[in-house]
Image (cartoon, rainbow, N blue to C red):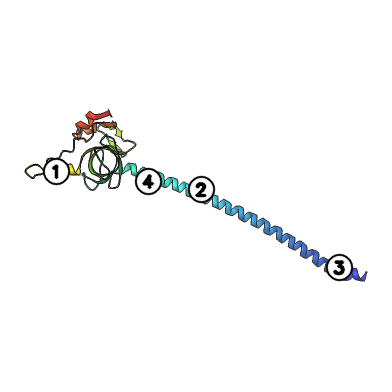
Amino acid sequence: YILRTCLKPFLIKTFVQTQVTEMAAALTSRLSKGGRSLLGGLSNAYTGLTNSSNGLMNGSILSQQQRTFIQMGTVLKVVDNSGAKKVMCIQSRRGKKGARLGDVIVGSVKDAAPNGKVKKTTVVYGVVVRAAMQKGRVDGSQVRFDDNAVVIVGTHKEKEKKNSDGKKKNFEYNQPTGTRVFGPVPHEMRIRQQLKILTLAQHIV
């Protein structure tokens, strides 16, 4: 009886400490799981927000590219059989603002067929026959294409050629280097006196 009386406070204290330890461990485990869930939720939310912002940014950049002029650095598709495939715009003969449908640009050939008339890195002149930038017409309609495209109308070497008397030849920007023009061409080329391009084109819109 005496021993039980002496050990009783010790046993109660040990039991209380054990219960407190178990409760603390359980609470810690719950908090840890909750923290991991919270961090996981925040991570997923951040990832979704990042993806959404990237999508909006890409769409905004694409939309901006479609609305702007053809400027220095713009890569255009070549739609004739001159041998060139892609041309990077160096400058527009229109001025600082940039080129639009029907304008003439100075460009450098970035990709070309091995046996074509126009070789890679050649400086060429091209007429913009298709533009992603929307252009209004007199009848109130709008014309816009899915890509930016040009027809080669000469090279820088051809322009610099001289006559027998030492004077430069009169260079015309309306004589295509190739003999065929692929894809649709707008009838605005007639206003720009690009009749040869209209003659070689497969479709006029």
Q: Are marks 3 and 2 in contact (CB under 8 Å)?
A: no
Which SS class for mark 1? Answer: loop
Up/down of 4 relative to 152, above or below = below
Residue type at mark 1 is Lys
The residue that label 4 is drawn on is 61
Q: Earlier in the sequence, mark 1 or mark 3?
A: 3
> Which numbered circle lies on residue 8?
3
Q: Residue furthest right?
A: 1
- Residue 89 is situated, as x and y percent measured from the top left of the image, at 27, 45
Residue 29 visible at all: yes
Image coordinates of residue 172 in percent, x first then y, are 16, 38
Badge 3 amino acid: Lys
Residue 104 appears anywhere in the view: no
Q: Earlier in the sequence, mark 3 or mark 2?
A: 3
Q: Residue at x 22, y 28 (%)?
A: 199
Label 4, secondary structure: give it: helix
Dots 2, 1 in contact, CB < 8 A: no
Three-letter amino acid code at disc 2? Gly
Question: Which quadrant does the N terminus fall into?
Answer: bottom right
Q: CA distance from mark 1 to mark 3?
A: 116 Å
Compared across the picture, whether 12 is left or right of 204 comes to right
Q: Secondary structure at mark 3?
A: helix
Given residues 57 and 82, the one toward you in this image is 82
Which mark lies nearer to you, 3 or 2?
Answer: 2
> Of the residues under marks 2 and 1, which one precedes in the sequence?
2
Q: Which residue is mark 1?
A: 161
| Residue type beneath disc 4 | Ile
Examine the image and state in which quarter residue 12 appears: bottom right
Dot 1, crowdedness within 10 Å: few (<14), some or many (≥20)? Answer: some
Q: How many marks?
A: 4
